[in-house]
Amino acid sequence: RYAYVNGRYVRHTDAVVHIEDRGYQFADGVYDVCEVARGFIVDQTRHLDRLGRSLSELRIDWPVHRNVLELVLREMVRRNRITDGMIYIQVTRGVAPRDHVFPHPSTRPSLVVTVKRLDPAIGEERAAEGIRVITVPENRWERVDIKSTGLLPNVLAKQKAKEFGASEAWFVDPDGTVKEGSSTNAWIVTWDGKLVTRPADSGILRGVTRTTLIELANKLGLEVEERPFTVEEAKAAKEAFITAATTIVMPVVEIDDEPVANGHPGTTALALRREFFDIAEKVSAC
Ligand code: PLP
């Protein structure tokens, strides 16, 4: 297995970063995750657009030209012989003696790319069963639109879910509306067949899968309502599901120990999952 670290492909076991990297000390960095499916990098343009936005919001420069990063992603998939899996891209502000203010003159941003193989059969099995989610109070900062490596509330929420026998935790605002999962966006399907998901400008990450799924829904003639929904509405909905790059569309069958509808994966979610790959952008890695 190979990792890419600041211009070099190195054996994963030998890949190291400096102890004064600001990512390590301050979580002063951003990341993005792309799915690899059937040998294709899925929705690469949207993931790199979002990486560029996260970087610019934090005033971190691109570590390499975007075209070069695209070549690195393909090379990582090729070298590691990934057919199905994920690519993790992380950029931090770089290495400098520890000081809260930005280094001056600015340092070269650090770039790390790793890949992981995932068995698509496992995802299919989970989708056939559906997953359980719990809800937790929203306790993150206001800039969750930036895909920052500072993920402690998300880590704690996901751990709580696991200890509860669930797969995801939904952050909920004091008004009872669902924000998103710790690493996924949240959706419901109403009894009259509309897809509902929170507007991307209201305290959530603009998921790439979310954006592509809205396109797919439009193509299929399904109505999408971008509005907040409450936990109670989700429990009483026809279906609930989550989306993320490697999860694609995953039915939710239980929220806080209560079944969603009849407690089985919804047909709309499963249909959207089946059709997703057809509409997504596919960049060949070979
Ligand atoms: N929301 C959060 C907090 C996430 O971390 C992620 C992905 O990691 C998502 C939503 C889904 O985004 P995407 O579909 O781009 O993977």
Image (cartoon, grey):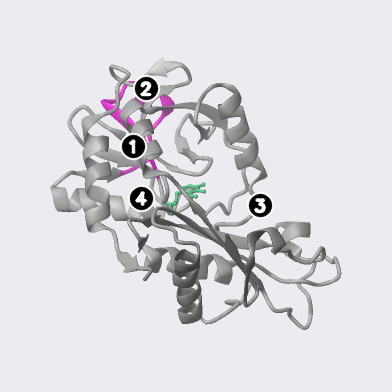
Q: Nearer the viewer, residue 66 or 196?
A: 66
Is label 2 in a helix, a strand or a loop? helix
Along the viewing direction, whichever of 82 and 114 lies nearer the viewer = 82
Residue that numbered label 1 is attached to: 124
Confirm or reject: label 4 Cβ below 8 Å from ligand 1.
Answer: yes
Q: Nearer the viewer, mark 2 or mark 4?
A: 4
Mark 4 = which residue?
210
Q: Amino acid at mark 3?
A: Gly
Q: Which residue is mark 2?
A: 235
Q: Determine whether the residue tagged by mark 4 lies in a helix, strand or loop.
A: helix
Q: Amino acid at mark 4?
A: Arg
Q: Look at the picture and state if 212 lies above or below 236.
A: below
Sequence-first tag of 4 and 3: 3
Disc 3 or 2, which lies upstream in sequence? 3
Quick check: is 231 in the magenta stretch? yes
Q: Which of label 3 and label 2 is nearer to you?
A: 3
Point 57% across, 80% down: residue: 64
Q: CA distance from mark 3 to mark 2?
A: 30 Å
Taking the image as shown, residue 39 lies to the left or right of residue 91, namely left
Residue in view at x 63 percent, y 40 percent: 155
